[in-house]
Image (cartoon, rainbow, N blue to C red):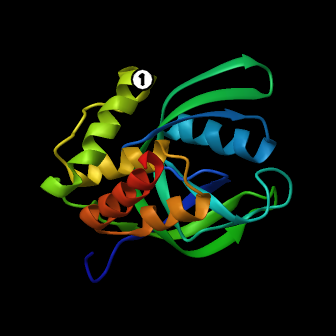
Amino acid sequence: MSAHPKQFRLPLFPLQTVLFPGGRLSLKIFEQRYLDMVKQAIADSTPFGICAIREGQETGTPAVPYEVGTLVRITDWDMPQAGILHIETQAANRFVIRRIDTEPNGLLVGTVDDISAEPTIAVPDELELAVEILRHIIGDIGASQFPAPFAFDDATWVGYRLSEVLPLKLSIKQNLLEMNDGVTRLRILTEFLKKQIN
């Protein structure tokens, strides 16, 4: 990370989910504050931030999000009926929230720092199990459900995709998101997988 990362303001969407860079997420939007936010993002081609909820709920009173979230861009949208928007999003890089302001309509807007992308790193031989399991999962669920291009030789990419699909607690997924070491993340996931297999 550079000494002076660029701070910017970003509308935040707290959810009961952790999204990893490169991931995809479909969302159904019906709350007015988020409809407004998404319409603005579509009109201006601007991103917003998805962050997991530390305290509170997805609807009603603004939730308290974790500090580290993921920037997303809308790749497709549809309005099947008035007042409901379906959007497809693609996750880019992570960010860390430095300050949060609450708009009159309850929308949270963060002043955030960009977290630079993790470098591509080879999968160590002793963690090949994780790659094999991810290949099986993708085979079962269907390749179209996963963001291309596939990078089975990159520990960071494999770790992100496994973190998304494995049945881990939200707080554990958040810890995996906040790590900046693709090999350590993959090692933790491999330990989890070994426990499930035995």
The residue under the point 33% across, 39% down is 133
The residue under the point 13% across, 54% down is 125
Quarter of the image with the N terminus in it: bottom left
What residue does disc 1 label?
A: 140
Give coordinates of residue 147: x percent, y percent. Answer: 36, 33
Give coordinates of residue 140: x percent, y percent. Answer: 42, 23
Q: Is residue 20 above or below residue 134?
A: below
Give coordinates of residue 154: x percent, y percent. Answer: 19, 49
Q: Is residue 24 above or below residue 11?
A: above
Is 134 left, or right, of 37 in this rendering?
left
Which residue is nearer to you in this view: 151 or 116?
151
Q: Quadrant of residue 94?
A: bottom left
Outermost residue, right direction? 60
Q: Amino acid at mark 1?
A: Asp
Q: Quadrant of residue 87?
A: top right
Which residue is nearer to you in this view: 146 or 3?
146
Answer yes or no: is residue 119 visible: yes
In the structure shown, which secondary structural element does the residue marked by tag 1 occupy? helix
Which residue is nearer to you in this view: 10 or 148?
148
Is 67 left, or right, of 1 in this rendering?
right
Mark 1: few/some/many CA within 10 Å (<14, 14-19, 20+): few
Outermost residue, front direction? 198
Outermost residue, bottom direction? 3
Is 53 left, or right, of 195 in this rendering?
right
Give coordinates of residue 109: x percent, y percent. Answer: 63, 63
Answer yes or no: is residue 122 visible: no
The residue under the point 64% across, 27% down is 86
Q: Count of labels shown?
A: 1
